[in-house]
Image: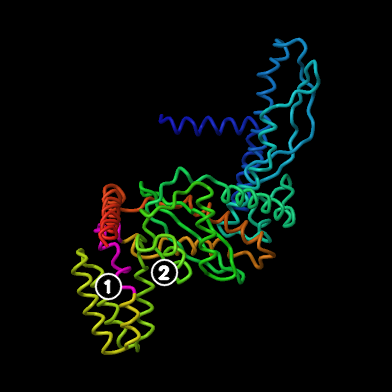
Amino acid sequence: MKVNTKRRKKARRGFEYIYGEEELVNKMFHILETGKQGMDAFILELGTMLAEAVMDMEREERSGPDYYPLHPEMYKWAYQQGSIYLGDQKIPVKHPRLRGPEGEIQLQTYGTLKKPGTFSEELLRKVLRGISLQKYGETVMKTAHAFGVSPSSLSRHIIEATAAQLREFKERDLSDFTAFAVFIDTIHRTGEAFMIALGIDREGYKRALGFWEGATENHIICEELLADMERRGLLVSRKILWVTDGGKGILKTLKDRFGKKLIHQRCTIHKDRNIQRHLAKKYRKEAHRRFKTALEQTRYEDARQMLLEFEKWLRGINTSAADSLLEAIEEILTLHKLRVSPLLRKTLHSTNPIESMFSTVRDCEGNIKRNQNSAMSQRWLAAVLLHCEKGFQRVKGYDAAISEVIAHIEAELEDLVELQAAA
Protein backbone atom coordinates (compact mmCIF):
# COMPACT_ATOMS: atom_id res chain seq x y z
CA MET A 1 0.00 0.00 0.00
CA LYS A 2 1.35 3.44 -0.93
CA VAL A 3 2.44 5.82 1.81
CA ASN A 4 -0.09 8.47 0.74
CA THR A 5 -2.94 5.97 0.92
CA LYS A 6 -1.87 4.87 4.40
CA ARG A 7 -1.76 8.51 5.54
CA ARG A 8 -5.22 9.24 4.17
CA LYS A 9 -6.71 6.20 5.91
CA LYS A 10 -4.94 7.12 9.14
CA ALA A 11 -6.25 10.68 8.89
CA ARG A 12 -9.79 9.40 8.31
CA ARG A 13 -9.58 7.16 11.40
CA GLY A 14 -8.38 10.18 13.36
CA PHE A 15 -11.35 12.29 12.26
CA GLU A 16 -13.74 9.43 13.07
CA TYR A 17 -12.19 9.20 16.53
CA ILE A 18 -12.65 12.95 17.10
CA TYR A 19 -16.18 13.36 15.73
CA GLY A 20 -17.60 9.85 15.51
CA GLU A 21 -18.45 8.20 12.19
CA GLU A 22 -22.01 9.52 12.01
CA GLU A 23 -21.06 13.13 12.76
CA LEU A 24 -18.23 12.97 10.23
CA VAL A 25 -20.67 11.80 7.52
CA ASN A 26 -22.99 14.68 8.42
CA LYS A 27 -20.13 17.13 7.99
CA MET A 28 -19.32 15.61 4.61
CA PHE A 29 -22.92 16.17 3.41
CA HIS A 30 -22.82 19.72 4.79
CA ILE A 31 -19.71 20.43 2.72
CA LEU A 32 -21.38 18.94 -0.38
CA GLU A 33 -24.38 21.25 0.14
CA THR A 34 -22.53 24.47 0.95
CA GLY A 35 -19.31 23.97 -1.04
CA LYS A 36 -16.24 26.03 -0.11
CA GLN A 37 -18.07 27.87 2.66
CA GLY A 38 -18.71 24.59 4.50
CA MET A 39 -15.15 23.39 3.93
CA ASP A 40 -13.75 26.69 5.26
CA ALA A 41 -15.89 26.39 8.41
CA PHE A 42 -14.71 22.80 8.93
CA ILE A 43 -11.06 23.81 8.44
CA LEU A 44 -11.48 26.67 10.92
CA GLU A 45 -12.95 24.24 13.46
CA LEU A 46 -10.00 21.90 13.00
CA GLY A 47 -7.60 24.82 13.23
CA THR A 48 -9.14 25.88 16.54
CA MET A 49 -8.78 22.35 17.91
CA LEU A 50 -5.18 22.19 16.71
CA ALA A 51 -4.30 25.54 18.30
CA GLU A 52 -5.79 24.49 21.64
CA ALA A 53 -3.94 21.15 21.43
CA VAL A 54 -0.62 22.90 20.73
CA MET A 55 -1.10 25.17 23.75
CA ASP A 56 -1.91 22.12 25.88
CA MET A 57 1.24 20.41 24.61
CA GLU A 58 3.38 23.40 25.62
CA ARG A 59 1.86 23.45 29.10
CA GLU A 60 2.47 19.70 29.45
CA GLU A 61 6.03 20.07 28.21
CA ARG A 62 6.81 22.78 30.76
CA SER A 63 5.00 21.42 33.81
CA GLY A 64 5.09 17.68 33.15
CA PRO A 65 2.09 15.29 33.18
CA ASP A 66 -0.26 15.17 36.18
CA TYR A 67 1.22 11.89 37.40
CA TYR A 68 4.83 13.06 37.07
CA PRO A 69 5.22 16.85 37.58
CA LEU A 70 8.62 18.24 36.61
CA HIS A 71 8.52 21.15 39.07
CA PRO A 72 6.74 20.92 42.45
CA GLU A 73 6.02 24.68 42.48
CA MET A 74 4.62 24.74 38.93
CA TYR A 75 1.10 23.48 38.33
CA LYS A 76 -1.71 23.60 35.80
CA TRP A 77 -4.39 26.13 36.52
CA ALA A 78 -7.59 25.37 34.54
CA TYR A 79 -8.57 27.22 31.33
CA GLN A 80 -9.64 30.75 30.46
CA GLN A 81 -11.56 32.27 27.56
CA GLY A 82 -9.34 34.16 25.14
CA SER A 83 -8.82 34.78 21.44
CA ILE A 84 -6.17 34.08 18.83
CA TYR A 85 -5.64 34.70 15.13
CA LEU A 86 -5.70 31.85 12.64
CA GLY A 87 -4.58 33.34 9.31
CA ASP A 88 -6.78 36.42 9.02
CA GLN A 89 -9.49 35.18 11.40
CA LYS A 90 -9.85 36.24 15.02
CA ILE A 91 -11.46 33.36 16.93
CA PRO A 92 -12.30 32.58 20.56
CA VAL A 93 -10.43 29.76 22.30
CA LYS A 94 -10.03 28.28 25.76
CA HIS A 95 -6.36 28.67 26.51
CA PRO A 96 -4.65 26.63 29.23
CA ARG A 97 -3.07 28.44 32.17
CA LEU A 98 0.05 27.63 34.14
CA ARG A 99 1.11 28.97 37.53
CA GLY A 100 4.52 29.16 39.16
CA PRO A 101 5.92 30.48 42.44
CA GLU A 102 5.80 34.08 41.15
CA GLY A 103 2.37 33.94 39.59
CA GLU A 104 0.98 33.04 36.18
CA ILE A 105 3.40 31.87 33.50
CA GLN A 106 2.57 33.03 29.97
CA LEU A 107 2.55 30.33 27.30
CA GLN A 108 4.69 31.27 24.31
CA THR A 109 2.33 29.62 21.82
CA TYR A 110 -0.65 31.63 23.10
CA GLY A 111 1.32 34.88 22.93
CA THR A 112 2.41 34.15 19.36
CA LEU A 113 -1.04 33.16 18.11
CA LYS A 114 -2.57 36.20 19.79
CA LYS A 115 -0.46 38.76 17.89
CA PRO A 116 -2.74 40.90 15.68
CA GLY A 117 0.08 41.95 13.35
CA THR A 118 -0.28 38.76 11.36
CA PHE A 119 -3.96 39.50 10.90
CA SER A 120 -3.21 42.97 9.51
CA GLU A 121 -0.57 41.66 7.11
CA GLU A 122 -2.78 38.82 5.87
CA LEU A 123 -5.69 41.21 5.39
CA LEU A 124 -3.51 43.75 3.57
CA ARG A 125 -2.31 41.09 1.14
CA LYS A 126 -5.93 40.19 0.38
CA VAL A 127 -6.91 43.82 -0.18
CA LEU A 128 -3.91 44.35 -2.49
CA ARG A 129 -5.15 41.41 -4.50
CA GLY A 130 -8.42 43.26 -5.04
CA ILE A 131 -10.80 42.38 -2.20
CA SER A 132 -12.93 45.34 -1.13
CA LEU A 133 -13.09 46.08 2.57
CA GLN A 134 -16.85 46.50 2.41
CA LYS A 135 -17.19 43.02 0.85
CA TYR A 136 -14.57 41.36 2.97
CA GLY A 137 -17.20 39.82 5.20
CA GLU A 138 -18.43 37.83 2.19
CA THR A 139 -14.99 36.36 1.59
CA VAL A 140 -14.13 35.21 5.10
CA MET A 141 -15.20 31.92 6.61
CA LYS A 142 -18.90 31.82 7.42
CA THR A 143 -18.91 30.40 10.89
CA ALA A 144 -20.29 31.35 14.27
CA HIS A 145 -16.74 31.27 15.64
CA ALA A 146 -15.53 34.17 13.51
CA PHE A 147 -15.87 37.67 14.88
CA GLY A 148 -14.25 41.11 14.63
CA VAL A 149 -14.63 41.49 10.84
CA SER A 150 -16.70 44.67 10.56
CA PRO A 151 -15.55 47.22 7.94
CA SER A 152 -14.53 49.70 10.66
CA SER A 153 -12.32 47.21 12.48
CA LEU A 154 -10.82 46.05 9.18
CA SER A 155 -10.04 49.65 8.27
CA ARG A 156 -8.14 50.09 11.53
CA HIS A 157 -6.09 46.97 10.80
CA ILE A 158 -5.37 48.20 7.27
CA ILE A 159 -4.25 51.62 8.54
CA GLU A 160 -1.87 49.93 11.01
CA ALA A 161 -0.45 47.63 8.35
CA THR A 162 0.01 50.31 5.67
CA ALA A 163 1.52 52.76 8.19
CA ALA A 164 4.08 50.12 9.17
CA GLN A 165 4.91 49.47 5.52
CA LEU A 166 5.28 53.19 4.81
CA ARG A 167 7.83 53.45 7.64
CA GLU A 168 9.64 50.39 6.32
CA PHE A 169 9.73 51.74 2.76
CA LYS A 170 10.74 55.32 3.59
CA GLU A 171 13.45 54.35 6.05
CA ARG A 172 14.94 51.19 4.61
CA ASP A 173 18.66 51.21 3.96
CA LEU A 174 19.78 51.30 0.31
CA SER A 175 23.52 51.05 0.93
CA ASP A 176 23.44 47.36 -0.05
CA PHE A 177 21.99 48.21 -3.48
CA THR A 178 24.57 49.05 -6.16
CA ALA A 179 22.52 50.59 -8.95
CA PHE A 180 23.31 49.74 -12.56
CA ALA A 181 20.21 51.36 -14.08
CA VAL A 182 17.50 53.58 -12.59
CA PHE A 183 14.09 54.26 -14.14
CA ILE A 184 12.33 57.47 -13.07
CA ASP A 185 8.71 58.22 -13.95
CA THR A 186 5.64 59.84 -12.43
CA ILE A 187 2.22 58.42 -11.59
CA HIS A 188 -0.66 60.81 -10.97
CA ARG A 189 -3.07 59.94 -8.17
CA THR A 190 -5.85 62.05 -6.64
CA GLY A 191 -4.57 65.23 -8.28
CA GLU A 192 -1.01 64.77 -6.99
CA ALA A 193 2.14 63.66 -8.80
CA PHE A 194 4.20 60.85 -7.26
CA MET A 195 7.66 60.59 -8.79
CA ILE A 196 9.00 57.06 -8.35
CA ALA A 197 12.41 55.47 -8.91
CA LEU A 198 12.89 51.80 -9.84
CA GLY A 199 16.42 50.41 -9.78
CA ILE A 200 18.23 47.44 -11.31
CA ASP A 201 21.39 46.37 -9.52
CA ARG A 202 24.52 44.87 -11.03
CA GLU A 203 23.18 41.36 -10.45
CA GLY A 204 19.99 42.06 -12.40
CA TYR A 205 17.61 42.37 -9.44
CA LYS A 206 14.97 45.11 -9.33
CA ARG A 207 13.94 47.21 -6.34
CA ALA A 208 11.58 50.14 -5.78
CA LEU A 209 14.02 52.76 -4.50
CA GLY A 210 11.76 55.58 -3.40
CA PHE A 211 9.02 58.07 -4.23
CA TRP A 212 8.37 61.76 -3.66
CA GLU A 213 5.06 63.61 -3.76
CA GLY A 214 4.45 66.94 -5.47
CA ALA A 215 1.79 68.94 -7.27
CA THR A 216 3.40 68.35 -10.68
CA GLU A 217 6.38 66.57 -12.23
CA ASN A 218 9.21 69.09 -11.89
CA HIS A 219 12.94 69.23 -11.24
CA ILE A 220 12.52 70.19 -7.57
CA ILE A 221 10.57 66.99 -6.83
CA CYS A 222 13.15 64.96 -8.74
CA GLU A 223 16.00 66.51 -6.75
CA GLU A 224 14.18 65.75 -3.50
CA LEU A 225 13.72 62.14 -4.63
CA LEU A 226 17.43 61.73 -5.42
CA ALA A 227 18.40 63.38 -2.13
CA ASP A 228 16.10 61.04 -0.20
CA MET A 229 17.64 57.97 -1.84
CA GLU A 230 21.13 59.28 -1.07
CA ARG A 231 20.14 59.90 2.55
CA ARG A 232 19.25 56.22 2.82
CA GLY A 233 22.58 55.08 1.43
CA LEU A 234 22.16 54.81 -2.35
CA LEU A 235 25.29 55.81 -4.26
CA VAL A 236 24.03 58.10 -7.05
CA SER A 237 27.04 58.04 -9.37
CA ARG A 238 27.89 58.95 -12.96
CA LYS A 239 28.13 55.24 -13.80
CA ILE A 240 24.37 54.74 -13.49
CA LEU A 241 22.28 54.38 -16.66
CA TRP A 242 19.19 56.59 -16.28
CA VAL A 243 16.04 55.67 -18.22
CA THR A 244 13.22 58.25 -18.51
CA ASP A 245 10.38 59.22 -20.83
CA GLY A 246 12.05 62.57 -21.58
CA GLY A 247 10.15 64.66 -19.04
CA LYS A 248 11.80 68.08 -18.82
CA GLY A 249 11.79 68.29 -15.02
CA ILE A 250 13.58 64.96 -14.58
CA LEU A 251 16.08 65.71 -17.36
CA LYS A 252 16.90 69.13 -15.88
CA THR A 253 17.76 67.56 -12.52
CA LEU A 254 19.93 64.85 -14.08
CA LYS A 255 21.75 67.29 -16.36
CA ASP A 256 22.34 69.72 -13.49
CA ARG A 257 23.95 66.89 -11.53
CA PHE A 258 25.96 65.14 -14.22
CA GLY A 259 26.21 67.52 -17.17
CA LYS A 260 27.89 65.91 -20.17
CA LYS A 261 28.68 62.83 -18.08
CA LEU A 262 25.01 61.90 -17.87
CA ILE A 263 24.32 58.39 -19.23
CA HIS A 264 20.70 58.72 -20.32
CA GLN A 265 18.44 56.46 -22.37
CA ARG A 266 15.28 58.07 -23.72
CA CYS A 267 12.23 55.79 -23.77
CA THR A 268 11.87 54.66 -27.37
CA ILE A 269 8.16 53.82 -26.99
CA HIS A 270 7.31 57.34 -25.83
CA LYS A 271 9.36 58.85 -28.64
CA ASP A 272 7.65 56.62 -31.21
CA ARG A 273 4.24 57.77 -29.94
CA ASN A 274 5.30 61.43 -29.92
CA ILE A 275 6.41 61.22 -33.55
CA GLN A 276 3.19 59.53 -34.64
CA ARG A 277 1.05 62.18 -32.95
CA HIS A 278 2.47 64.71 -35.40
CA LEU A 279 1.50 62.60 -38.41
CA ALA A 280 -1.70 61.94 -40.31
CA LYS A 281 -3.04 58.42 -39.82
CA LYS A 282 -2.00 57.24 -43.28
CA TYR A 283 1.70 57.78 -42.41
CA ARG A 284 1.78 56.33 -38.89
CA LYS A 285 2.17 52.64 -39.75
CA GLU A 286 5.13 53.30 -42.05
CA ALA A 287 6.71 55.69 -39.52
CA HIS A 288 6.48 53.04 -36.81
CA ARG A 289 8.03 50.42 -39.11
CA ARG A 290 10.99 52.64 -40.02
CA PHE A 291 11.61 53.66 -36.41
CA LYS A 292 11.43 50.06 -35.14
CA THR A 293 13.68 48.73 -37.91
CA ALA A 294 16.35 51.32 -37.12
CA LEU A 295 16.37 50.40 -33.41
CA GLU A 296 16.63 46.69 -34.19
CA GLN A 297 20.11 47.24 -35.63
CA THR A 298 22.96 45.98 -33.46
CA ARG A 299 25.63 48.54 -34.38
CA TYR A 300 25.30 52.17 -33.31
CA GLU A 301 26.47 53.44 -36.71
CA ASP A 302 23.85 51.42 -38.60
CA ALA A 303 21.01 52.44 -36.28
CA ARG A 304 21.99 56.12 -36.43
CA GLN A 305 22.21 56.11 -40.22
CA MET A 306 18.74 54.58 -40.52
CA LEU A 307 17.30 57.11 -38.07
CA LEU A 308 18.81 59.97 -40.10
CA GLU A 309 17.20 58.55 -43.23
CA PHE A 310 13.94 58.28 -41.29
CA GLU A 311 14.33 61.93 -40.28
CA LYS A 312 14.65 62.98 -43.94
CA TRP A 313 11.50 61.00 -44.78
CA LEU A 314 9.63 62.68 -41.91
CA ARG A 315 10.78 66.15 -42.93
CA GLY A 316 9.10 65.71 -46.29
CA ILE A 317 5.82 65.01 -44.48
CA ASN A 318 5.87 66.96 -41.21
CA THR A 319 8.71 69.17 -40.00
CA SER A 320 7.63 68.99 -36.37
CA ALA A 321 7.81 65.19 -36.41
CA ALA A 322 11.31 65.34 -37.89
CA ASP A 323 12.41 67.85 -35.26
CA SER A 324 10.98 65.65 -32.50
CA LEU A 325 13.13 62.75 -33.68
CA LEU A 326 16.26 64.81 -34.26
CA GLU A 327 16.31 66.45 -30.81
CA ALA A 328 16.48 63.04 -29.08
CA ILE A 329 18.40 60.93 -31.59
CA GLU A 330 21.54 60.48 -29.44
CA GLU A 331 19.59 59.71 -26.28
CA ILE A 332 17.52 57.15 -28.16
CA LEU A 333 20.74 55.38 -29.20
CA THR A 334 22.51 55.38 -25.83
CA LEU A 335 22.17 51.59 -25.50
CA HIS A 336 23.56 51.08 -29.00
CA LYS A 337 26.50 53.32 -28.18
CA LEU A 338 27.19 51.27 -25.03
CA ARG A 339 26.92 48.05 -27.08
CA VAL A 340 24.19 46.60 -24.87
CA SER A 341 23.18 43.09 -25.93
CA PRO A 342 19.79 42.78 -27.72
CA LEU A 343 18.36 40.69 -24.87
CA LEU A 344 19.24 43.21 -22.16
CA ARG A 345 18.22 46.08 -24.44
CA LYS A 346 14.64 44.79 -24.37
CA THR A 347 14.48 45.76 -20.68
CA LEU A 348 16.40 49.04 -20.85
CA HIS A 349 15.16 50.69 -24.06
CA SER A 350 11.92 51.95 -22.52
CA THR A 351 10.20 52.81 -19.24
CA ASN A 352 8.07 49.64 -19.53
CA PRO A 353 9.48 48.09 -16.30
CA ILE A 354 8.29 51.02 -14.19
CA GLU A 355 5.08 51.41 -16.23
CA SER A 356 4.33 47.76 -15.47
CA MET A 357 4.76 48.52 -11.77
CA PHE A 358 2.37 51.49 -12.13
CA SER A 359 -0.19 49.13 -13.67
CA THR A 360 0.00 46.96 -10.56
CA VAL A 361 -0.42 50.06 -8.39
CA ARG A 362 -3.64 50.98 -10.24
CA ASP A 363 -4.98 47.42 -10.00
CA CYS A 364 -4.25 47.10 -6.29
CA GLU A 365 -5.82 50.47 -5.53
CA GLY A 366 -8.92 49.75 -7.57
CA ASN A 367 -11.12 49.37 -4.47
CA ILE A 368 -10.11 52.68 -2.92
CA LYS A 369 -13.00 55.00 -3.66
CA ARG A 370 -11.37 58.14 -2.28
CA ASN A 371 -8.09 59.16 -0.72
CA GLN A 372 -8.77 61.22 2.34
CA ASN A 373 -5.37 62.91 2.52
CA SER A 374 -1.72 62.74 1.52
CA ALA A 375 -0.85 60.40 4.40
CA MET A 376 -3.35 57.83 3.17
CA SER A 377 -2.04 58.10 -0.41
CA GLN A 378 1.54 57.57 0.73
CA ARG A 379 0.63 54.64 3.00
CA TRP A 380 -1.10 52.83 0.17
CA LEU A 381 1.62 53.60 -2.38
CA ALA A 382 4.36 52.26 -0.11
CA ALA A 383 2.35 49.10 0.62
CA VAL A 384 1.69 48.48 -3.07
CA LEU A 385 5.32 49.09 -4.09
CA LEU A 386 6.49 46.55 -1.51
CA HIS A 387 3.81 44.19 -2.80
CA CYS A 388 5.10 44.70 -6.37
CA GLU A 389 8.63 43.77 -5.33
CA LYS A 390 7.47 40.26 -4.42
CA GLY A 391 6.66 39.69 -8.09
CA PHE A 392 9.85 41.18 -9.54
CA GLN A 393 11.90 38.86 -11.71
CA ARG A 394 15.58 39.06 -12.51
CA VAL A 395 16.13 40.89 -15.81
CA LYS A 396 16.95 38.76 -18.83
CA GLY A 397 20.53 38.94 -20.04
CA TYR A 398 21.91 40.08 -16.69
CA ASP A 399 24.84 37.65 -16.39
CA ALA A 400 27.78 38.83 -18.50
CA ALA A 401 25.92 41.64 -20.26
CA ILE A 402 25.65 44.03 -17.30
CA SER A 403 29.34 43.83 -16.44
CA GLU A 404 30.19 44.51 -20.08
CA VAL A 405 27.91 47.55 -20.18
CA ILE A 406 29.50 48.92 -16.99
CA ALA A 407 32.92 48.56 -18.62
CA HIS A 408 31.68 50.50 -21.67
CA ILE A 409 30.22 53.23 -19.44
CA GLU A 410 33.54 53.60 -17.61
CA ALA A 411 35.35 53.81 -20.96
CA GLU A 412 32.94 56.51 -22.19
CA LEU A 413 33.53 58.55 -19.03
CA GLU A 414 37.31 58.22 -19.35
CA ASP A 415 37.19 59.40 -22.98
CA LEU A 416 35.10 62.38 -21.94
CA VAL A 417 37.57 63.33 -19.21
CA GLU A 418 40.45 63.13 -21.69
CA LEU A 419 38.61 65.35 -24.18
CA GLN A 420 37.85 67.93 -21.49
CA ALA A 421 41.49 67.89 -20.36
CA ALA A 422 42.72 68.38 -23.93
CA ALA A 423 40.30 71.27 -24.43
Horizontal side, residue 151 vs residue 186: left or right: right
Q: Nearer the viewer, residue 315 or 411?
A: 411
Q: Position of residue 218 (x, y in %)?
A: 52, 69
Location of residue 300 (image quadrant):
bottom left
Measuring 72% from the left and 57% from the top, which residue is drawn there? 151
Q: Is residue 140 magenta?
A: no
Q: Does residue 413 appear anywhere in the picture?
A: yes
Label 1: few (<14), some or many (≥20) within 10 Å?
A: some
Q: Nearer the viewer, residue 263 or 358?
A: 263
Mark nearer the viewer, 2 or 1:
2
Q: Is residue 339 magenta?
A: yes
Horizontal side, residue 336 vs residue 390: left or right: left
Q: Is residue 11 above or below residue 64?
A: below
Q: Position of residue 115 (x, y in %)?
A: 68, 39
Q: Position of residue 342 (x, y in %)?
A: 25, 60
- The secondary element bearing badge 2 is classed as loop
Specify the segment rendered in magenta.
328-345
Amino acid on which the number 1 mark rests in the picture? Lys
Quarter of the image with the N terminus is top left
Q: Does residue 30 appear anywhere in the picture?
A: no
Amino acid on which the number 2 mark rests in the picture? Asp
Location of residue 376 (image quadrant):
bottom right
What numbered label is drawn on residue 245?
2
- The secondary element bearing badge 1 is classed as helix
Horizontal side, residue 279 vs residue 26: left or right: left
Q: Is residue 168 above or below residue 337?
A: above
Whole-number angstrom distance, CA of label 2 to CA of label 1:
17 Å
Helix, strand or loop: magenta stretch: helix
Name the residue tied to disc 1.
292
Quarter of the image with the C terminus is bottom left
Q: Nearer the viewer, residue 21 or 97?
A: 97
